[in-house]
Amino acid sequence: MRLAVFASGAGSNLQAILDAIEDGSLAAEPALVVSDRPTAGALERAARAGVDQAVVEPSHFDDPEEYGAALLASLEEHGVDFVALAGFLRMVPANVIAAYRNRMVNVHPALLPAFGGKGLYGRRVHEAVLEAGVRWTGATVHLVDEHYDTGPIVLQEPVPVRQDDTPESLARRVLEMEHRLYPRALRLFAEDRVRIEGRKVWIGEEGER
Ligand code: GRF
């Protein structure tokens, strides 16, 4: 699996993926890191790991289609066959989603379909969770479709909400869970253990599909 990771921010999920590849628990080739921002911390992590990087800024293009064409050219050039969004704060253009249908996943810091959708990212997710008074939140890895956070769910893990949690403390604990969950989800794809039927994602046991 030749993997591209899209990231806009610090890139701690990217790091977790690179670490899993490095320690042999994820059989993937880190082909490319893509960012929409030249200052993203994720790019430094890519450089440190010796992974190729591409900065593709949407403001340099007339419309989403052209932006998508530039992304696709970069992905093609690097022979990418699977894409992981890791804190990528842009809507991925429709032509890229179509080209990587069922081969593109995202990690979200809550238990979807709750606390997802446009505008619910980063700290806002955890504020909404605390505001709602729910006892559990968590992390979700899902396939990417044309809408925010609505694609079929691949894996989820819960994280308890504590009475004294702040958005920051909750974000920290959820992020730790993301770092475990995301490489695990990618491993399922790398081992060809994922079957997708409409909104249902079936995970095969090791050795079966
Ligand atoms: C994570 O919480 C991820 O779920 C969300 O953005 C954050 C990215 O963090 N989409 P990092 O850049 O991977 O450190």
Image (tube, rainbow, N blue to C red):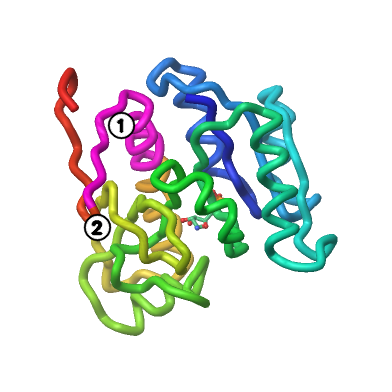
Task: State the residue position of label 2.
Answer: 199
- Check disc 1: other Cα within 10 Å, few if <14, some if 14-19, many if 20+: some
Relative to residue 51, is residue 21 drawn left or right? left
Relative to residue 109, is residue 114 drawn left or right? left
Q: Residue at x 71, y 50 (%)?
A: 69
Give the quadrant of residue 93.
bottom right
Q: Residue at x 43, y 59 (%)?
A: 145
Q: Nearer the viewer, residue 97 or 53?
A: 97
Position of residue 65 relative to residue 42, above or below, is: below
Q: Residue at x 30, y 31 (%)?
A: 188
Task: State the residue position of label 1.
Answer: 188
Relative image position of residue 127 (x, y in whole percent): 43, 77
Residue lying at the far right in this picture: please name it: 60
Relative image position of residue 170 (x, y in whole percent): 39, 63
- Residue type pointed to by label 1: Leu
Q: Which mark is residue 4?
A: none
Relative image position of residue 25 (x, y in whole percent): 38, 20
Which residues are drawn in magenta? 180-197
Element under disc 2: loop
- Check disc 2: other Cα within 10 Å, few if <14, some if 14-19, many if 20+: few
Q: Nearer the viewer, residue 109 or 73?
A: 73
